[in-house]
Image (cartoon, rainbow, N blue to C red):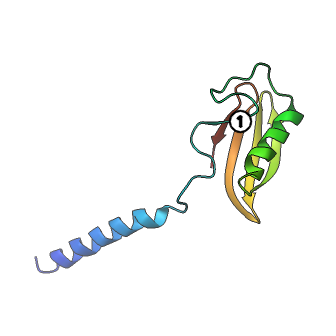
Amino acid sequence: MKAGIPLITLLLIFVLFSATLAWHRDHPVTPYGDFCPECSSYGMCKVMLSPEKAEKAIRNYYGHKGFNVKIDGVRGRFIRATIRNDDEVVDKIIFDRKTGRIRSIY
């Protein structure tokens, strides 16, 4: 019984601090369900963006935030990209060229 109290206290401290250490950023790089400003604020483009226009829109969106973009590939109406801050990968996204939706997959 005497050994149980310090063990429980140690476990509680570990659980409380492990959740705090798991958070690596104050603000996400890509807010959940954000939209490309090339389309509309409601997420529906009038026409599907070409891959070139979509790449430009992604670079503009993250360039204003101070990040670099590496396009990983285009597949159908989706573009997959890696977002970097210098050499550190900070996010991986999928961009929907039809709706303008930007989703983090990181």
Query: For residue 95, which quarter of the picture?
Result: top right
Does 104 appear above or below 13? above
The structure residue drawn at horizontal position 74% and vertical position 23%, both measured from the top left corner, is 45
Near-viewer residue (33 or 15): 33
The structure residue drawn at horizontal position 38% and vertical position 69%, both measured from the top left corner, is 17
Taking 105 as reference, is 5 left or right?
left
Query: For residue 55, which quarter of the picture?
Result: top right
Near-viewer residue (28 or 17): 28
Q: Position of residue 43 (x, y in %)?
A: 65, 27
Q: Position of residue 3 (x, y in %)?
A: 17, 80
Name the element at disc 1: loop
Q: Please give the residue where the numbered disc 1 appears in the rendered image.
A: 36
Q: Amino acid at mark 1?
A: Cys
Q: Quadrant of the N terminus?
A: bottom left
**Label 1: few (<14), some (14–19) or many (≥20) C-alpha neighbours in 10 Å:** many
Does 87 appear above or below 43? below
Count all numbered tags in the image, as a single digit.
1
Near-viewer residue (26 or 89): 26
Residue at the extreme left: 1
Residue at the extreme top: 46
Query: For residue 18, which quarter of the picture?
Result: bottom left
Taking 99 as reference, is 17 left or right?
left
Does 13 appear above or below 30? below
Q: Position of residue 8 (x, y in %)?
A: 22, 71
Does 82 appear above or below 42? below
Taking 56 as reference, is 91 left or right?
left
The structure residue drawn at horizontal position 82% and vertical position 27%, both measured from the top left corner, is 49
